[in-house]
Every structure is written in C-alpha cells, then in structure tokens.
Image (cartoon, rainbow, N blue to C red):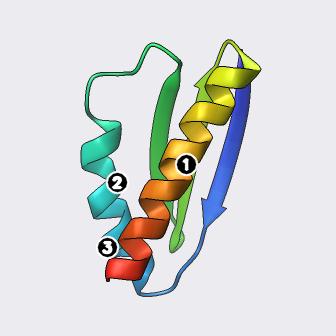
Amino acid sequence: MKEIIFKICLGNLTDALYKSLIAEVNQEAPKKGRVNIEYNNGCLYLTILSDTLSGLRALSNSYMNLIYAMITSI
C-alpha cells in the first residue's frame, strides 16, 4: 500500500482545520483508499493510503482542495 503524509502547522488555524477535517475523515471510507488524521504538538498530520498511485493522487488532491477552501474561508 502506498502512503503519503502531510504535516500542516498553521498556528491558531490548525485546531479549526482539524475540527473541520475530522468530520470528513470519519465518513465512510472511499474505495480509492484510507485517510487518517492526527493532531500533535500544534500540527496536523494527514495520512493518505491507497493501493494505487492514481488513488493516492485523487485523495491527496481532494483533501488539498478541501484544506485550501477551509483556510481561505476562516
């Protein structure tokens, strides 16, 4: 299984981002892969796992677009 980990540290925005993303991550897992989220030491760790490179790319792109939308609306 392929894996990518994003470390996101945004100061005061990190907690709000975590609370927003946790609802997305806890939804039924997409068929393309799995997504895990952790909040440690003021940073958000988003782990995306998939059997295929295209699945990894698709999930990463979706979450990066979602994070961008959240950050620009806060």
The circle drawn on residue 21 is: 2
Q: Quadrant of residue 31?
A: top left
Q: In this view, does 23 lie above or below 54?
A: below
Give the residue pinned by disc 3: 16
Question: Which of pointers 3 and 2 lies earlier in the amino acid sequence?
Answer: 3
Q: What element carries label 3?
A: helix
Instruction: Give the alpha-carbon distance from disc 2 to disc 1, as whole Å.
Output: 9 Å
Q: What element carries label 2?
A: helix
Residue 47 position (above or below residue 13): above
Can you say whether 63 is above or below 35 in the image? below
What's the CA distance linking mark 1 and mark 3?
A: 14 Å
**Distance from label 3 to label 2 (Cα)?**
9 Å
Q: Which residue is drawn at 53% across and 80% down?
A: 10
> Left of 42 or right of it: where is 66?
left
> Residue 25: which numbered mark, if any?
none
User: In the picture provided, is 4 more to the left or to the right than 44?
Assistant: right
Q: What residue type is labelled 1?
A: Leu
> Is the C-beta separation of discs 2 and 1 under 8 Å?
yes
**SS type, badge 1:** strand
Q: In which quarter of the image is the C terminus?
A: bottom left
From the viewer's perspective, tell me whether residue 57 is left or right of residue 10.
Answer: right
CB under 8 Å between discs 1 and 3: no
**Which amino acid does the dot numbered 2 rest on?**
Leu
Q: Mark 1 points at which residue?
A: 46
How crowded is the residue under tag 2: few (<14 C-alpha within 10 Å), some, or many (20+)? some
Q: Position of residue 54 (x, y in %)?
A: 70, 23
Residue 7: image location, x then y, percent: 65, 60
